[in-house]
Amino acid sequence: MIRRIRCPEDLILGGVIIKELDINNQIRDREIRVIDSDGSPLGILDTREAMRLAEERKLDLVKVSPNAKPPVCKIMDYGKYKYDTTKKEKESRKKQKVINVKEIRMTPTIDEHDLQVKIKNANKFLAKGDRVKVVVRFRGRQLGHTEIGREVLMKFIEATSEFSVVDKRPKMEGRQMVMFLNSKN
């Protein structure tokens, strides 16, 4: 999970983090490059002159690129800009598809009926579009016979081939053999 550390300048609106930009009197630079509300450049102006232009149009002066030389500021309605960015963020979140990884655990000595139940569950997960992690755990002397676990996983692959594609082939990781399956659709 990726965690984002919030800066004090960040603003949370509707669960969406928006980077706070310098506006109006917060801009401390002497000269700035100004862009008009329609996107046309007005050139390099004194900050007070740019503030006066923004006030005449009843809009805000917003520093959009603070690292440029000179900094770039745009004349815009800042409230509308924040509203539009939060709306776009929410829309992009709605379109994201969350893929869950479901784990199925077995032993190399699994009974045929138990294996069929696990296969049925895996097919259900794969039909939903989830990713499946299949794990065969070895205990004690079973570690000497990893080929039995590999055979179980190969049976599993054959049985789920209608719904799945092998994403990661069976591989030993410590005391367990692991493989990943992805849904075909």
Image (cartoon, grey):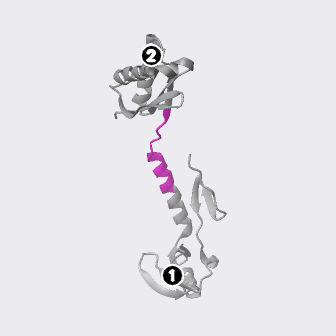
> Can residue 96 be found in the magenta stretch?
yes
Look at mark 1 in the image and give the residue it sits on.
69
Q: Residue at x 51, y 18 (%)?
A: 142
Mark 2 secondary-structure assignment: helix
Q: Residue at x 42, y 75 (%)?
A: 39
Determine the residue located farthest toward the right in the rendered image: 8
Query: Can residue 48 be seen in this snapshot?
Result: yes
> Can residue 7 be found in the magenta stretch?
no
Query: Along the polypeptide, which appears first: circle 2 or circle 1?
Result: 1
| 99 with respect to 12 (left or right) | left
Q: Position of residue 81 (x, y in %)?
A: 52, 65
**Nearer-the-camera pick, 121 or 137:** 137
Residue bounds of the magenta highlight: 87-101
Q: Amino acid at mark 2?
A: Leu
Q: Viewer-nearest of labels 2 and 1?
A: 2
Quarter in which the N terminus is drawn: top right
Q: Amino acid at mark 1?
A: Lys
Q: Does residue 168 sit above or below 59 in this rendering?
A: above
Query: Can residue 120 be seen in this snapshot?
Result: no
Q: Does residue 111 sit above or below 91 in this rendering?
A: above
Instruction: Give the class, few, some or many, for how many residues have Cα within 10 Å of label 1's Cα (few <14, many ≥20).
Output: few
**Nearer-the-camera pick, 142 or 26:** 142
The quarter holding residue 140 reads top right
**Nearer-the-camera pick, 169 or 59:** 169
Look at mark 2 in the image and give the residue it sits on.
115
Q: Position of residue 66 (x, y in %)?
A: 55, 75
Instruction: Give the class, few, some or many, for how many residues have Cα within 10 Å of label 2's Cα (few <14, many ≥20).
Output: some
Determine the residue located farthest toward the left in the rendered image: 162
Q: Position of residue 145 (x, y in %)?
A: 46, 19
Q: Which secondary structure type mostly characterizes the magenta part of the structure?
A: helix
Mark 1 secondary-structure assignment: loop
Q: Does residue 148 sit above or below 71 in this rendering?
A: above
